[in-house]
Amino acid sequence: MALTQYSDDGLFLPQKIAAALRTTSAEVARTVGLGRDAVQRKDRLSSDKTQRRLREMAEILNRTEPRFGSALMAYAWYRSEPLPGFSGLTAMQLVRDGRAGDVMDYIDAVDAGVFS
């Protein structure tokens, strides 16, 4: 899925992400470690923190979708698959803890064959 499908006018929109993943905006907010008001209030939606977290999730899903065959399967992996070397934490838990860079590094390592 193209990143532009998740955005509009330069902002990542939780409603578009939720529609693509067949979930709710509140659930999208929860999976990136934000409160519901961060995705419902216009001033909060455009904040750097909110946009950064939404972008990180979109980038992770965009990188893993080809491996899993669909955005829904990539989202299921993101939410539920413990990552080796991260004490059983999932990509979602790492992103919520502000460690999206670690998830991206892990994906890069898998793509390079380090964990194959």
Image (cartoon, helix red, strand yellow):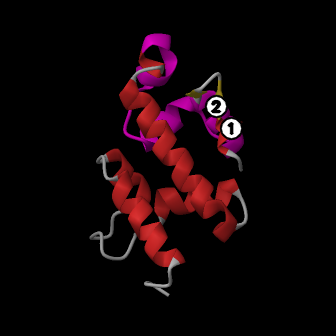
Instruction: Answer with the quarter of the image where residue 89 lies.
Output: bottom left
Please name whichever residue, 3 or 39, is drawn nearer the observer in this view of the structure: 3
Query: Which amino acid type is shown beneath numbered disc 1?
Result: Thr
In screen coordinates, is 97 left or right of 60? left
Mark 1 and mark 2 in contact? Answer it, CB < 8 Å: yes
Residue at the spot 70% in from the left edge and 46% down from the top edge:
2
> Could you say which quadrant of the image residue 47 lies in?
top left
Q: x, y percentage for residue 66?
A: 68, 65
Q: Is residue 88 above or below residue 15?
A: below
Residue 90: percent from left, percent from top = 40, 62
Q: Which residues are magenta?
A: 14-43
Secondary structure beneath label 1: helix
Q: Does the magenta stretch mainly form a helix, a strand or a loop?
A: helix
Q: Badge 1 local density, few (<14 within 10 Å), some, or many (20+)? A: few
For residue 65, say whether it is visible. yes
Depth order, front residue of 45/22: 45
Q: Secondary structure at mark 2?
A: strand
Q: Residue at x 49, y 77 (%)?
A: 110
In the figure, is residue 57 to the left or right of 13? left
Query: Residue 25: within the magenta?
Result: yes
Asked if residue 90 shows in the view, the reply is no
> Badge 1 is on which residue?
4
Above or below for 46 versus 57: above
**Disc 1 and disc 2: Cα gap in Å?**
5 Å
Query: Are there few (<14), some (14-19), or many (20+) residues within 10 Å of tag 2?
Result: some
Residue corresponding to mark 2 = 7
Residue under the image location 49 percent in, 56 percent down: 79
Q: Residue at x 54, y 50 (%)?
A: 59
Residue 35 percent location from the top left of the image: 38, 28
Q: Quadrant of residue 69?
A: bottom right
Residue 103 lies within the magenta run: no
